[in-house]
Amino acid sequence: MQWEKVGNRRIMMFIGEYEHSLDEKKRISLPKSFRTGLGKKVVMTRGLDNCLFVYSRANWEKVAAKLQELSFAQADTRGFNRFILSGAAEVEVDGAGRILIPEHQKEFAGLKKNVVFAGVSDRVEVWDAERWNTYKARIEKQADALAEKLGEIGAL
């Protein structure tokens, strides 16, 4: 985790990639560098690309507030809200820094024994290690083209 100064305030930014193993009880140790920023209770939900998103309570409240602002009259909005919100669970971090991954989330993300935690700005993503390595190899090959597209819209 890293702190970034934005205006007059400091915001936490999760960065880095860490591999850990699920134990037989579906518990996994959060990387030490993420624990402080996430807190003692986290919100974990289905994410995009078949990973899980893990948010601190404060960051989750921001995400949930944005989702509530969307119109429920549109089918795509209703579907996305259902996907993110119904898949969410509040998870406690135990004294050893471990979290228990709910079975429905473990199945959704295809988590086996080896798991990768990836810090992605305001959230941490949880990936099956094999799936992460495949995804990462594909994205690394596209990095130049992605940067060019982002440059065209002024994001870089």
Image (cartoon, rainbow, N blue to C red):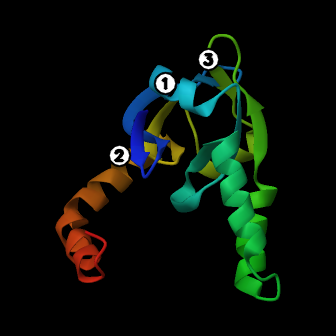
Residue at disc 1, secondary structure: loop
Q: Earlier in the sequence, mark 1 or mark 3?
A: 1
Q: Residue at x 76, y 86 (%)?
A: 75
Location of residue 22 with respect to 125 vertically, above or below = above
Instruction: Tell me where residue 63 sits by quadrant.
Output: bottom right
Q: Are marks 2 and 3 in contact (CB under 8 Å)?
A: no
Q: Earlier in the sequence, mark 2 or mark 3?
A: 3
Q: CA distance from mark 2 to mark 3?
A: 25 Å
Mark seen at residue 97: 3
Q: Is residue 32 left or right of residue 91?
A: left
Q: CA distance from mark 2 to mark 1?
A: 18 Å
Q: Residue at x 78, y 43 (%)?
A: 89
In the rendered structure, which amino acid carries the disc numbered 1?
A: Pro
Q: Residues within 10 Å of mark 2 (few under 14, many from 20)?
A: few
User: Which of the two residues, 101 or 66, is positioned nearer the viewer here?
Assistant: 66
Name the residue that disc number 1 marks. 31
Viewer-nearest of discs 2 and 3: 3
Location of residue 149 with respect to 110 vertically, above or below = below
- Residue 141, position in %: x, y? 21, 62
